[in-house]
Image (cartoon, rainbow, N blue to C red):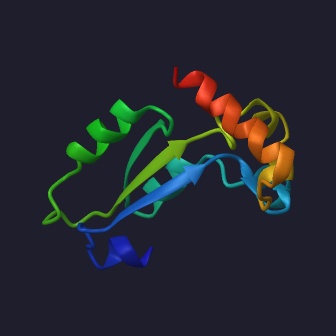
Amino acid sequence: MAASHYGLGNLVAVVDANGFSGGGRTSKAINVEPLAARFEAFGWTVREIDGHDTEALIDTFDALPEPSRDRPVCVIARTVKGKGVRDMEEAPQAWHLGHLTGEAKDQVLAEIAGRMK
């Protein structure tokens, strides 16, 4: 509310909307949807994109309104936790606060390297 009230057109917020928090699905802790409509209700200009689409990210940031405008911008990047690593995508809560060691680390690095060939 304060950002739009004070006309902070040079402010850009990027929200990683992946549906999870440290305690599990965000919808179980507090339903934040419809996220875009909530930001718009507080006077923000909203752009909603696939956060895994590099071209969409570049295009969105290249097309941001001039900072001299009086409305802040919110970029909602819809993402999947652990995108590209099967075990992480299938069990996102287990990896939210985790770290990789030993065999699990080697497996993830091999999976990523396999896609880069």
Q: Which residue is drawn at 58% across and 23% down?
A: 115
Task: Name the residue rendered at 78%, 62% in the picture.
Answer: 97
Please name the residue shown 45% across and 64% down the image: 42
Question: Residue 13, image x and y in percent?
Answer: 42, 62
Depth check: give the residue in front, 17 or 37: 17
Side (left or right) of 42 relative to 58 = right
Is residue 84 something that shows in the picture?
no
Q: In this view, does 2 lie to the left or right of 25?
A: left
Q: In which quarter of the image is the N terminus?
A: bottom left
In the rendered structure, the answer to whether residue 45 lies left or right of residue 14 reads left
Of the pair 111 and 35, the residue shown nearer to us:
111
Q: Report the residue at 69% width, 29% height from top.
A: 111
> Which quadrant of the structure image shows residue 60?
top left
**The quadrant where residue 32 appears:** bottom right
Count of numbered marks? 0
Task: From the top left corner, tell me how far across and down residue 83 is, in percent.
Answer: 64, 36
> In the image, is 96 to the left or to the right of 52?
right
Q: Which residue lies furthest to the top in this view?
A: 117
Q: Residue 102 in the image: x percent, y percent?
A: 83, 51
- Above/below status of 77 relative to 59: below
Res. 43 in view: yes
* Residue 41 % position (x, y): 47, 58
